[in-house]
Amino acid sequence: MSASNRIGANTKIILEQIDDALATVALLTQAQVEHGLAYLPIFERLERGREQMSSLNDRLVRAVARIIGSDLRP
């Protein structure tokens, strides 16, 4: 497995876990009706974390692709 595939696989798992957590918090928000707003900061934090992880993954994959496509390979 290439380095870029390993990076993508690792972050894919983390993104899936965050997506699962987002779904759970959304269900809690809906189920708690009037108290559901208490979960909103958690939902928003998970969304920000997902965006950051996705961005990190994109940058790492581009960095590895640059190395693979150049003469700078170790």
Image (cartoon, grey):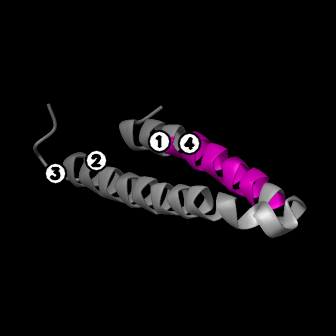
Q: What residue sits right under mark 3 in the picture?
A: 70
Kind of residue sitting beneath label 1: Asn
Estimate how packed mark 3 is, as few (under 14), some (14 to 19) or many (20 or more) residues with alpha carbons within 10 Å.
few
How far is mark 3 from mark 1, CA to CA?
Answer: 18 Å
**Mark toward the viewer: 2 or 3:** 2
Q: Secondary structure at mark 4?
A: helix
Q: Which mark is residue 64?
A: 2
Q: Is residue 71 above or below residue 59?
A: above
> What x and y, as percent, mark residue 39?
67, 58
Estimate how packed mark 1 is, as few (under 14), some (14 to 19) or many (20 or more) residues with alpha carbons within 10 Å.
few
Q: Which mark is residue 5?
A: 1
How far is mark 2 from mark 3, CA to CA?
Answer: 10 Å
Q: What residue sits right under mark 4 in the picture?
A: 14
Are the residues tagged 2 and 1 within 8 Å (C-beta)?
A: no
Q: Which residues are magenta?
A: 11-27
Towards the viewer: 63 or 18? 18
